[in-house]
Image (cartoon, helix red, strand yellow):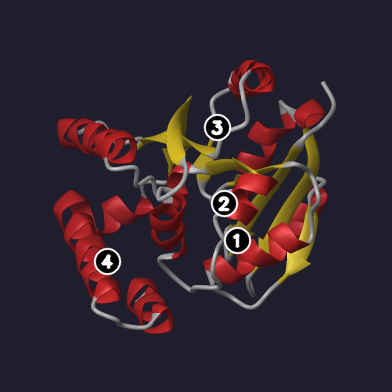
Amino acid sequence: MRPQLAVIIPARDEAAALPLLLADLALGAHLIAELLVVDGGSTDGTAARAHLAGAQVVLSPPGRGGQLLAGVAATSAPLLWLLHADVRLPPHWPQRLERLLALQRQAAPAPIAWFGDLKVPLAAPQYRLMEFLVALRSRVLQRPYGDQGLLISREAYRQAGGLRPLALMEDLDFAERFSRSGRFAALGLDLQVSPRRWRRHGLLGTSWRNACLRRAWRQGVSDVALSDRYRA
């Protein structure tokens, strides 16, 4: 199978987490045509570690939406896989993608995008409930978020209008627009996310904080102001 994936990873101060993801991706190097880390002004050596792992590095102003746009513009492979820098992939991800791509070649073209199943590496049972609710939201409400990854053909991405250069909420904004004419489907892969935000704020605190940010965005608060709140 010819390499078809452009893997795009926006990063900012992810020197500790990023090498682990890049090591996971190395297991499927035969599927990846372009591996791009878009660094948004890191001060911890993120770009240097990405270079050492063999990734191409593009520099961009901070802001995940803008970083992703820069990555899409700098690549040309037919499939885009947008991944956050602090996720981990299971070892069997190349086999799963190979099967998926083979099935897609046999099927009629359709606007479809895939997401991973969110997994949090914390033992408390309430996180299993949260994972279930995220899966339900993603499948039924068609609202996967960026930390679940986004696998989409470049053409389907273009038809949906692409991402906007938002500092925050770029994933929700795109999901709402894409779901009007396309559909999201489960990739069949667990994506383990860093537990740092839940360790810092707890499950209820993190959920409440995210809900407040989404509500403020819908009320018209700018993405830059929301990003400042998020990072604070």
Element class at badge 3: loop
Three-letter amino acid code of the residue under disc 3: Leu
The residue labelled by disc 2 is: 85
Residue 145 in picture, x, y percent from top left: 40, 50
Q: Are marks 4 and 2 in contact (CB under 8 Å)?
A: no
Badge 1 or badge 3: first in the primary sequence: 1
The quarter in which the N terminus is drawn is top right
Q: Are marks 1 and 2 in contact (CB under 8 Å)?
A: yes
Q: Are marks 1 and 4 in contact (CB under 8 Å)?
A: no
Badge 1 or badge 4: first in the primary sequence: 1
The residue labelled by disc 4 is: 214
CA distance separating discs 1 and 4? 22 Å
Q: Which mark is residue 11?
A: 1
Query: Which marked residue is nearer to the observer: mark 4 or mark 2?
Result: 4
Q: Are marks 1 and 3 in contact (CB under 8 Å)?
A: no
Within 10 angstroms of label 3, few (less than 14), some, or many (20 or more) residues?
many
The quarter in which the C terminus is drawn is bottom left
Residue 28 in picture, x, y percent from top left: 72, 27
Q: Splitting the image into 4 quarters, where does residue 217 fall?
A: bottom left
Badge 1 or badge 2: first in the primary sequence: 1
Query: Which marked residue is nearer to the observer: mark 1 or mark 4?
Result: 4
Query: Which marked residue is nearer to the observer: mark 3 or mark 4?
Result: 4
